[in-house]
Image: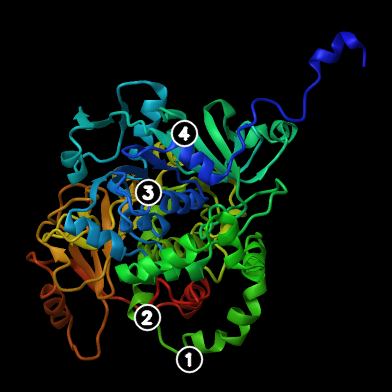
Amino acid sequence: MNDRFAAFSLVEHEGPDKRATFAEAVGRFVRPGMTLELAVTLARPNAWIHELIRAFRGTQPGFTLVTLSLSANASLLVQVGLASRAITTFCGDAYPSPSPNGLLRRAIQSGRLAVENWSILTLPLRLKAAAMRVPELPTHSLVGSSMAVENAHAFTVRDGVGWVKPLAPDVTLIHALAADRSGNAVLAAPRGGGHFGALAAREGVLLSVEKIVSTEWIRRHAHLGFLPGAIVRAVVEAPLGAHPAASWPGDTGIDGYADDYAMLGELHDVARSPAAADEWIREWLVETVDHAGYLNKLGEERIAGLRARAGGESWRSQIEHHGAAGAEGERVGARPASPVERQVVEAAVEIERLAAEEGCATILAGIGNANLAAWLAKRRLAARGLDVALIAELGMFGYEPRPFDPFVFATHNIATATWLADVETLMSMVLPSERMPCVGAIGAAEVDRLGNVNTTRLADGTPITGSGGGNDIASAARAVVVTAALAPGRFREKVGYVTSPGSRVRAVVTERGTFVKQRGDEPLRLQSYVPLAALTTAEDHVREIQALVAWKLEVMPDLRPVPEPNSAEVDTLRLFDPERHFLG
């Protein structure tokens, strides 16, 4: 090349070299009293959590944690006394089903952990406001909920619109797919809320990645990037740095891996006992010394299995086990539909009905049976020639659920999406869209006569899990279907805590029957009941249901028995959830 133009050559590695170990990065950039964001994309910053425990165990650093989901590994930070406050949207475990985490529940009830509850959209909006250096941002969410009252210091309502105030963490901890030595990074998709806090953090980002690559590689994948190196303080190469969570690489050539359900289940179990949690921490984090030791303890065979499950067609390897060897025992002819399976089918019927009536183009459901119902409803709508896209809160659009795994963010589902975005795009622009109306489906711990939902805190102060995306769905979807168990004390005259307002709720589906209403302040009315052999008449069934409902029950004029579910649909549910995580 002519010397005249040598200065225009691109170099393989550009910018300052910020490579470090976890111990070096935490030692240099994390101080007691900090507000730390644990950024959530599909991948979670679990290797950073492990290092924080190694570095600060036995001290009381008084961290405030900011995260979309305080669960599994993050709960261990609370167990060892590192966090005194959490600003979050979900306080519990998603595996094996959405449920409280024992360590977190005890810490909250004892006063060791103070929790500030937000929704999966409003928390990233607060981080975005801080990154934009603006005093507030608008949202459809939280209006009419108990969170609006509790968070008056950072949330106001004007003319029916909510406004959130900024929240800037001191440091954001994030795990990405790849970065160069200077920290220019490509995040794992879907991006969740990962980049908002990173751009808002006062003292920058601590970044771990599956692989450190050249700047030339980053340039070739710049269309996927979301983190500039200028905000990164240190970058650590950490294969499986999100474990036991997943990392989906797309077609980047970086190795991916699936969620380690065995370890997620183990973490949920040990959370029942502080002693068991302490023993797990000793065995997996203290004695392993560092991330390399942790991977060595996982072992090559387990890691290889997780990598094999990350592929988009990996579900096919389970056909022989789930689809043939065990299928006959799961078919309706061999085992009748359970009450929960009948509930899910009826919820799918309601989602289908509302999607067709309202001309909805999308369905958004939370984790659990509401999600299984959404998957089934999409199939019912497709059979009628209606094209409706499934969407998921971290940023998935147009995905097609694969069999054998009921968890929405399984990597083989991500591989089918037609668009991978982030929380803000999906929840604040797609969900309330007039061009793409959405029917939502959420679960509930408690429901009242107006359809208000509580998933946050019982009347005696017992914590449940929080909103997640439930409030956002209930606040902006065209119509909402709720799934709930009709158990003593759960259907109240008025819930003590409104996580998700009921103004858009159109149906509440239980294992005993379905309640419906139109928009607004109309009460729920009983539309159908599940026939029980011990009860003879419709009136007998109404009396039984009334005994479980705290308000004077109104009955629709065309009250009907719930028909037996279509056997093919029940078989499909069993293929979606062969281990019965949600179906019970």
The residue shown at (73%, 48%) is 253
SS class, disc 1: loop
Q: What is the crowding at mark 3: few (fewer than 14 residues within 10 Å), some, or many (at least 20)?
A: few
Dot 3 amino acid type: Glu
Kindly report which numbered mark, 2 or 4, lies closer to the viewer in this rendering: 4
Q: What is the crowding at mark 4: few (fewer than 14 residues within 10 Å), some, or many (at least 20)?
A: many
Q: CA distance from mark 2 to mark 4?
A: 51 Å
Provide the residue designation for mark 4.
198
Query: From the image, which quarter does the N terminus lie in?
Result: top right
Q: Which mark is residue 334?
A: 1
Provide the residue designation for mark 2.
564
Measuring from the top left, give residue 323's x and y in whole percent. 60, 79
Query: From the image, which quarter does the C terminus lie in?
Result: bottom left
Dot 4 amino acid type: Ala
Does the rendering let one see residue 223?
Answer: yes
Q: Earlier in the sequence, mark 3 or mark 4?
A: 4
SS class, disc 4: helix
The residue shown at (36%, 41%) is 121
Q: Earlier in the sequence, mark 1 or mark 3?
A: 1
Q: Are marks 1 and 3 in contact (CB under 8 Å)?
A: no
What residue occupies the far left of the structure in this picture?
552
Measuring from the top left, give residue 156's x and y in whole percent. 20, 30
SS class, disc 3: helix
